[in-house]
Image: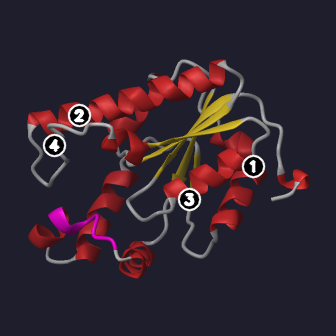
Amino acid sequence: MTADDVVDLAPRAVLVIGVQGAGKSAVGRRLAERCRRGAFVEGDVLWKMVVGGRIDMAAAPDAEAERQLALRYAHGALLATSFVRAGFVAVHADNMYGPAVAEQLAGIAVPRSLVVLRPRPDVVERRERERGTDAYAPWAAPLGSRLAAIEQFDAWLAESPAVGLWLDTSDLTVDETVERILERWPETFVD
């Protein structure tokens, strides 16, 4: 990355969401790196902070799994808000769907944006296979396949508020996705 690639954006919290394998972490990190003052808050890191007694989400989650997920989201909002107040563009990438998205945006008390990465389910399935991960395993068995699980997650994503910038990133690289976000920056605003 050269100095010409750096953008000078006003401080703002940017929530980047999508299904597992959509490219949230890669795109979020690259977007933060492109900012003159950028910070990256990764949902997976927040998830891993619980090192004793962690209960992961599942197809039929228990109350503790839901409580820990809400805690992770709350800490993401707090971190993003803190970075923005310190003069940074804070990019927070996490798995978030439906009503949780509106709740998360409401919990961010500074200017905020939403970017929804929505590649086609078949593309996500191919990416998951290529990277050797199995994030969909707990959901795939009851639904019959990983693709069916991805389609279910995509349906949940579709229930998210129709605000911000939604991108089909099926045929875009990470850098191309970041360029689209920057080209359409005002469309990301949800404040």
- Magenta segment: 133-138
Q: Which numbered disc flags the more N-terminal residue, 2 or 3?
A: 3
Which residue is the site of mark 2?
A: 68
Amino acid beneath label 4: Ile
Q: Is the Cβ of the residue at disc 1 closer than 8 Å to that at disc 2?
A: no
Give the CA separation, mark 1 to mark 4: 35 Å
Question: Residue 98: percent from the left, percent from the top?
Answer: 34, 43
Q: Give the residue at mark 4.
A: 55
**Residue 66's image quarter?**
top left
- Considering depth in this image, is 139 or 48 the residue closer to the camera? 48
Q: Earlier in the sequence, mark 3 or mark 4?
A: 3
Residue 34, numbered circle = 1
Q: Residue at x 38, y 39 (%)?
A: 46
Discs 1, 3 touching: Cβ within 8 Å: no
Badge 2: residue crowd in 10 Å (few <14, some 14–19, many ≥20): some
Q: Secondary structure at mark 2?
A: helix
